[in-house]
Image (cartoon, rainbow, N blue to C red):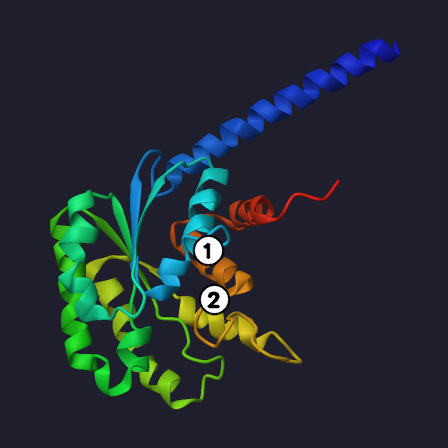
Amino acid sequence: MNRTMDIRKMTMAAVLAIGMIGVTEVQAKRLPVKEGQKIAFLGDSITQGGVGPKGYVTLVISGLASAGVKVTAIPAGISGHKSNNMLERLDRDVLSKKPDWMTLSCGVNDVWHGANGVPLDKYKENITKIVDQCQAAGIKVMILTSTMIGEDQPNANNQKLVAYNEFLRTLAKQKKCLLADLNADMQAGIAQVKEKKGYVLTGDGVHMNDAGNEMMAIGVLKAFGLSKAQVEQARKSWAPAPSK
């Protein structure tokens, strides 16, 4: 009798497992990003650092894999780069690689570099050209709002950055791009910390720590259409294996 019950339990577990595989496949088919596609990640030092073991680029790729979509990353982040720099190297670092998707993370240095930065009117021109050239080449674009410059929203840089991010939100609607509103996510994450001691999501106020990279990755995965359950599954896949 016990043997029969054990067999039934094993059979039921197998059926459930097969069912879950089927559900995962159906969910994956509903996502705009597909199996085997390539995603270029255009950005500055935050994106350059994002290709590390715990960086947001790496987490996005593994997060998509956990949802049943295996894709390839094309790293295109260079430290210190602004919108003009990214426009200048767009063909070399993105278009020539023929990705299916490109995520665009640009704005921090345009503001943070002050007199050596890029004023809003020129920033708008540069970013629009980047998006237009990608779409003309058949590359789908996801726009990321620029993360904070210092973890205190009232400071002068963050206040200046507001107009840049408002433009990005508007452009995403106009050009029908996916939008990951990372600035809003970052502000919300910091606001949840009741007793703030040191930095919450960055190591220096700008560049992401592990928590910041997870925040960015989750924002991108949500923008790609992953459900809450899929995002949670991704987060579990990022957790370090328990020590034996």
Q: Nearer the viewer, residue 23 or 201?
A: 201
Image height of 168 relative to 136, above or below: below
| Residue drawn where x is 80% and y is 15% of the image | 6
Specify the amino acid type for callout 2. Met
| Residue drawn where x is 40% and y is 36% of the image | 70
Asked which quadrant contains residue 9, the reply is: top right
Residue 232 percent location from the top left of the image:
57, 49
Image height of 188 relative to 11, above or below: below
Horizontal side of 31 relative to 177 (left or right) equals right
| Residue drawn where x is 61% and y is 25% of the image | 17
Residue 92 percent location from the top left of the image:
16, 52
Where does label 2 land, which residue? 208
| 10 Å crowding of disc 1: few (<14), some (14-19), many (20+) | many
- From the image, which quarter does the C terminus lie in? top right
Residue 7 percent location from the top left of the image:
76, 12
Of mark 1 and mark 2, the one earlier in the sequence is: 1
| Residue drawn where x is 45% and y is 80% of the image | 150
Asked which quadrant contains residue 27, the reply is: top left
Where does label 1 land, which residue? 55
Residue 219 percent location from the top left of the image:
44, 59
Secondary element type, mark 2: loop
Residue 236 visible here: yes
Specify the amino acid type for callout 1. Gly
Secondary element type, mark 1: loop
